[in-house]
Image (spheres, coloured by chain):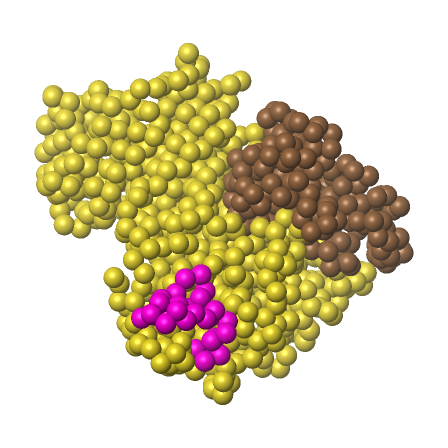
Amino acid sequence: MEVFTLNINGEKQEVNVDPNTPILWVLRDSLQMMGTKYGCGIAQCGACTIHVEGVAMRSCQLSVAAVKGKKITTIEGLSENASHPLQEAWIEHDVPQCGYCQAGQIMSAAALLKDKPNPSDADIDAAMNGNICRCGTYTRIKAAIKTAAKNG
Amino acid sequence: MTIIKTSVGRRSFLKSSAMAGGGLVIGFNFLSSCQSKTEEEIMAMPKEWFDINAYLKIGDNGVVTIVSPNPEFGQNVRTSMPMLIAEELDVDWEKVIVEQAPYHPEKYGFQFTGGSRGIMSRWEPLRMAGASARHMLREAAAQQWQVPMEEISTASGVLHHELTGKSIPYGEIASEASNIPVPKEVVLKEIKDFKIIGTSRKNVDSKSIVTGEPMFGVDYYQEGMFYAMIEHPPAFGMTLKSVDKSSVINMPGIKDVLTIKSYKDGYEKRVFDTNAFSEIVAIVGNSTWEVMQAKKQLKIEWQAIEAYSETVTSFRGDKKTVNIPAGLESTAKHNKQMDILSAKQGKIVRKDGNPDLAFKNAAKVIERTYSAPFLAHNCMEPMNAFAHVTGDSVKIAAPLQIPGSILPTVAASLGVAVENIEMDITRMGGGFGRRAYAHYVVEAALISQQMEAPVKLIYSREDDMTHGIYRPTYRATYRAAIDANNNLTALHVKAGGIPESPLFADRFPAGALDNYLAEEWSIESNITIGAFRAPRSNFMAGAEQSFLDEIAETIGKDPIQFRLDLLQRAEDNPVGEKNDYDAARYAGVLKLVRDKSDWDVNQSNAHRGISAYFCHNTYAAHILDVTIENGKPVVQNVSCAIDCGVVVNPDAAKNMAEGAIIDGIGNALFGELSFKDGIPEKKNFDTYRMIRMSEAPKNIDVHFVENEIAPTGMGEPPFPPIFGALANAMYKATGTRNYDQPFKVTKDVLG
């Protein structure tokens, strides 16, 4: 066990955990930040996507030791009151069905728009292919990303 | 005008005795759990709430809380069910806050999610809840104003009396209304007067979802709870022999290692108690990660099961004996067994006319065999449950489709009374049938009982995929007799599977053919199977619709016209009396999708496939356009037509159809779970291919038949026919037909 000071959504958080613990489980079990989801544990589904220094990462494969001192953003910290253009677009397009994957989808999309404010369909496919939506909301996700790009 | 007697389900409207004296005042701190801050922010908080009935309470400022009774797994009933109530209550949707009902069947009836029956089963009861509340409000105003109730109208949550010019908002008279007796009968609105039903309303949970608020079962947290995971036998056909607790008990954060026996000896299972692994090991600790580490190190010995039989009570209450064979099963052996049974005569389920003679006299016979593998549900949220057993009282919070089905089992396994179990229904991260089988709730409860502490049980993805209640593997052989004039004179279907047959003998094209024969067979297995989005239909639609396509091609008919001709026959002069479809509505979706997709005019650069099906009380037809790029199918467009009666929330219904289409294409192209020596050969998403963004259709258009028929379901019906539409389109593109799922592009691509 080791004490880590983490920078999550602009706030300092102290946790005492095994250094190998993936940041996913630190968020969920130690800090009760439930927005970041467990889906596969092997970086294949994208449900656990967070930003580390602005880059989309799979938090199930990222140890707490590896993100010590780095700027972490989770879905809870993406915006104040759902005001990120992607969150607004998600609501406008009524994207979610079950909703479980959507936080990860939005975090992947947010990193994409930061790099490419006007992504092509191929850009969206490439950036979002690591995020599984079992309910099949892909067409709405793509439409919402385009709307957010326009409004962003 | 629809008059509904409220005596049916009247218990739902009995008011709590606590409010006998002037309306029940309920603290509004529960609002912290309500679905939308936006609505909260717009709406000033009421000082008092008045319970009108179990489904709704009205705040003194006119804000209305509506309780949504059924579990939500993405079908959006938490929006559409409250819409039914709000419509008849006659309030503005913007004034509505939605709350999830806890499990309470006396108040909320049959709380379940499955069979596409949610809206269908709630269509009248929920409107009645709204209408009876409106009636009580009008009666309260009539008493206050001393005018006949019939003269009082309502609009947007305000009562009006035209002759005297009086009006009063609901919130100001809700207290009085809550003391009015529940009416014996109520008048429901006519469809033409609907203001909310039939208009698209946004998902009430969207904001919570996009901000990551805790709402799923796996998000449930209680101070001091332990985390638990399971180890189950690695193969079907095996069970627990022994566990060496000492191998992990000293690892960091580990509290205990337990063995769990999910059913007491002699417990008579019911249909949703399906569970191959009733004796398992649980690892309990302080955090999920620590438990995962111990799980990897834990030394367990497994042993082969012996064959056994069990009596299972079906959904309808009849009992049947199920034989579970011993042995370690493999897909290769399954396929050989299915080859043998496909070649033998099956059990004849329906026979019309003289099919033998028709085949004997046929100028041409086409015979094709279709197959599909086992499928895993792969809900994105793995199976999980929270349980806290303290003495003989039990608290459960879990994502599950049919809470009432597992409670008796939980009670029996724990040795407590059902009445002592309190259950919160959480949002589900997908269900697709899997969460009808809630053995994980029993497991969590038993772990909590042994630990004497609150426990959250979570399956790893690998546990979720390898401890499945799978879609069975199926086969169907179709034969068609065609005469010298290119008329289809007989159809023969023989279908089977492991361990159940997928056949629906009375579905189309039964009833449209003078000579028809349907047979079925099945093979026993120890691999557990269960409901998977549109059970059995999810295979039969693809097989049947592919075969009809091949017949149409053989006899030189347009595939839509061919189906329409058969349906016309079934409508005008049906064969047999048990035909399980309305031929005119079936034809209706085919005609609508033909028109909307310009079938007769435009073939564009893509290759088109048509398919239609009727299941779960709703008709669906798809036209799918595909191109082949770099040896892979690219779905350019899907046009879809659906007849589900009145569409309550059109955009949400479209979302369901889009999802079903994408899910179906994914399963048709990639879905496959095979077994070797009882072991599922895929354990996670690195090998189990799920459809991804780049493989989804580029566009989907959904169209609804407009009518005034009471609504039927949307969750399942658009799913089965997409398999056929994809198969038929891929044939057009490649010149090769796919008979076995998952589909492949095997031949040269046609121009």
Residue B86: image quadrant is bottom left
Counting from the top left corner in percent of width and height, residue A141 is at 57, 38
Q: Is B749 placed left or right of B291 in the picture?
A: left
Q: Is B260 placed left or right of B627 in the picture?
A: right
Outermost residue on the front side: it is B164
Q: Is residue B330 visible?
A: no
Identify whether B428 is placed above or below A57.
below
Residue drawn at the location 79% of the way across and 41% of the way down: A52
Start-end of magenta stretch: B151-178
Give the colour chain A carries in the figure: brown
Could you say which is closer to the camera, residue B503 or residue B629?
A: B629
Identify whether B56 is placed above or below A76.
below
Q: How many marks?
A: 0
Q: Is residue B571 visible?
A: yes
Q: Does the magenta portion include B387?
A: no
Counting from the top left corner in percent of width and height, residue B739 is at 37, 30
Residue B315: image quadrant is bottom left
> Where, quadrant-wise, is the N terminus of chain A in this rendering?
bottom right
Q: Does the magenta portion include B173?
A: yes
Q: Is A62 placed left or right of B241 in the picture?
A: right
Give the colour chain B carries in the figure: yellow
Residue B542: image quadrant is top left
Outermost residue on the top side: it is B751
Could you say which is closer to the camera, residue A101 or residue B33?
A: B33
Residue drawn at the location 41% of the way across and 62% of the way down: B155
